[in-house]
Image: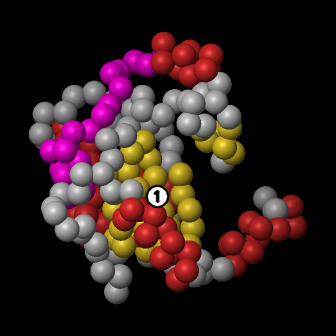
Amino acid sequence: MNPADEPQGFRKMRMQKVLGYMLTWTTYGSWLQGDRRKYVKNGQILDPNPSLENKNKENLKYPKVSLNAKQRKIIEKAIIEESAGLNQKVYAIAIGKSHIHLVTDCNFISAASAVSHYKNAARLALKGNGFVGRLWTKGFSVRYCFDENQLNTVVDYVNRHKQNPPSKSPQVYPRG
């Protein structure tokens, strides 16, 4: 693409240093296109569409995945271990029944590559513990953080949305 043809906001984003990003992805069948909670397609948030959601439910090839507490702990451990291999600092992580929120530094790794690594590490860890089937939906969401305020905002968001934390006190991974 010719840089002159890029949207102005994209050019600005490309020129700024990315401090980190919040990555979000969902379990298979848990948030379908058409969902009543709205949904994202091609980067746009779309309104609910019950007929589309029903059609997508009919087309599921595997059972909908809802992670139990043991599976969430296994996934968290696998992601933390994978982040060390990628040399990425984890600022916050929340493993819900139907989705993952992860805030890391970028360390020159694209969001798509990082998500691919994390999804695969979690899938292999669960497979090693007896999971069979499709675990993740295709795709992911990313929010880039260009300054400390944006980074702190997404870290706070993830920490507020933890479901069933692995210990009594919230586990926060230090930045630095």
Label tally: 1
Position of the C terminus by quadrant: bottom left
Q: Name the residue rendered at 55%, 80% in the picture.
A: 149
Q: Is residue 23 left or right of residue 78?
A: right
The image shows residue 152 at horizontal and vertical percentages of 48, 76
Residue depicted at x 53% and y 20%: 56
The picture places residue 8, in percent across and down from the top left corner, at: 82, 68
- Whether residue 64 is visible to the viewer of this picture, yes or no, is yes
From the viewer's perspective, is residue 137 above or below residue 17? Answer: above
Q: Name the residue at 21% across, 39% down.
A: 68
Instruction: Examine the image and state in which quarter residue 123 appears.
Output: top left
Q: Is 47 drawn above or below residue 22 in the view shown?
A: above
Q: Quadrant of residue 127?
A: top left
Q: For the N terminus, which image quadrant?
A: bottom right
Q: Is residue 54 left or right of residue 43?
A: left
Q: Residues within 10 Å of mark 1 (few under 14, many from 20)?
A: many
Q: Is residue 116 left or right of residue 3?
A: left
Q: Amino acid at mark 1?
A: Leu
Q: Residue furthest bottom?
A: 176
Where's residue 131, x and y in %? 19, 33
- Residue 89 lies in magenta, yes or no? no
Residue at horizontal 15 percent and vertical 44 percent from the top:
70
Q: Nearer the viewer, residue 99 or 20?
A: 99
Q: Which residues are magenta?
A: 59-77
Looking at the rendered structure, the secondary structure element under dot 1 is strand
Residue 109 visible to an observer of this rendering: no
Compared with residue 163, is residue 153 higher up or lower down, i.e. above or below?
Answer: below
Residue located beneath label 1 in the image: 23
Does 72 appear in magenta?
Answer: yes
Point out residue 57 in the picture as x, y percentages from the top left corner: 48, 18
